[in-house]
Amino acid sequence: MKLTHTQVITFTYFALILFGGFFLCLPIASRTGEWTPPLDALFTATSAACVTGLVLYDTYAHWSVFGQMTLFILFQIGGIGFMTVITMFSIFLKRKIGLYERQVLVHSTGLLKLGGVVRLIKSIVLLSLCIELIGAVLLALRFCPQMGVKSGIYNSIFHSVSAFCNSGFELMGQYGQFSMLHGYIMDYPVCLTFILLIVTGGIGFIVLDDIRIHKFKFENYSLHTKITLTVTGILILLGFVLINIFEYDGLLAGLSVKDKIIVSLFHSINSRTAGFNAINTAGLKEASVLLAMVFMFIGGSSGSTAGGIKTSTLAILVMSAVNSTRRVNKMLVFKRKLSDKTVKYASSIVTIYISAIITAAIIICAFEPVSIREALFECVSALGTAGPSLGITPALGYTAKTVIIILMFSGRLGWITLLLAFAKKHIDPPFERPGEKILIG
């Protein structure tokens, strides 16, 4: 059976999750040597493969080394892309990459053109491994003296890959279940290493490759790179300022100026993509919770390890709204013109994401004793593959877990990709319908 490119991507991710869920079910995957309920294993496998970070169990306390390694493999493959991993095996085996496979790679990595896709795949893997290795070395300098050499190296590699892939999985349960990164939020070297890994993973492989080629010459970057870096910088700064304002007499109260800076900076970056809970999310003020939901909804950048509607989509919609109020027809960005098709695509993504979140939140509220605030936060976190939670994840029932699994899966693949995988090909009729105007706004 001839599959379309979107169907190949969808089914391979689905197969990856099923295999991961099967291995996590096994007694060898848990510390107690008992079977893990199939739905819970599937939930955890989906969260890892879709680099989300929502968990039902504390990763260190529940999963054995085998289970932790299964999660490690899932979020490493899910982060850099399943098709990327398959292609690297093909290159290693000196197998020729055909046209069909190249087209699938273009769809899976978010490239805009077919040329140079294999070269970019090699760059993606090498850059990823180098960044993860550097991150692991920096973390090992702090972890090894505290945990011992063997445990320190193991934790350094696990957390470096987890941070770069924006997966949000951590092993700090050794200091208390669900303690997460609370004990390291004031450790500047560890915190800054996490920040650098999250940002580099969240801006996307295309941007990283562009920076590698053109160094720091902004004028030579592609339009995608310019938009991504600009919007990412604005969002980080905006989140940093607003968290300081909202939580000045809240979670930041009593902290020194240095500590307030590092905590607010980490939360600004982490809440959009990574899902490492370094502060008590349940203790955030309502304004901070709403800000976190907006940031999770936006997510990271196209072609990255992060989810959400993406920074480029946000930029297009904002500029489109500004142009509409100024009655400007052409969409110009950095002296380049964007097509109307791009604007329509961005609008479609936002409409689908909002519809999915509202529908999922209604279902969860109907079957679970949670507030609409908690349900919306969980749904946005799952669909944006962000990972933060207000603490309701372990208590969810079967229906809510299934809804969250669907959201995480669709959020990682993208709703457009998922819908195209099952939609029939539409052929426009060979004639035009008469036009008519309607009122808008």
Image: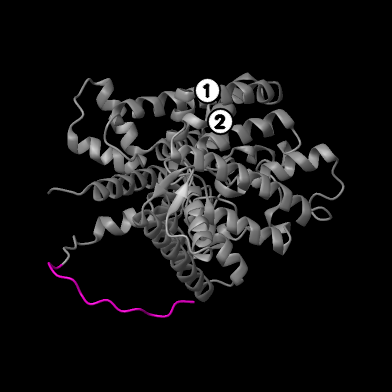
Find disc 1 in the rendering and name its residue. 133
Query: In the displayed structure, would residue 320 be above or below residue 213?
Result: below
The three-letter code of the residue at mark 2 reads Ser
Secondary structure at numbered mark 2: helix
Badge 2 vs badge 1, beta-carbon distance below 8 Å: yes
Q: Name the one closer to the observer, 215 or 67.
A: 215
Query: In the displayed structure, would residue 209 be above or below residue 432?
Result: above
| Label whose residue precedes the other's in the sequence (2 or 1) | 1
Q: Provide residue 372's location: percent of width, then percent of height.
A: 59, 71
Please state the extent of the stretch shown in magenta in the rendering: 429-441
Q: Would residue 300 appear left or right of 185 to someone viewing this image? A: left
Q: Provide residue 110's location: percent of width, then percent of height.
A: 36, 42
Q: How does the figure colour the protein chain or chains?
A: one colour
Q: Would residue 229 appear left or right of 343 to someone viewing this image? A: right
**Magenta stretch encompasses residue 14:** no
> Can residue 179 be seen in the rendering of this structure?
no
Q: Would residue 283 appear left or right of 174 to someone viewing this image? A: right
Task: Name the residue at 53% across, 63% down.
Answer: 326
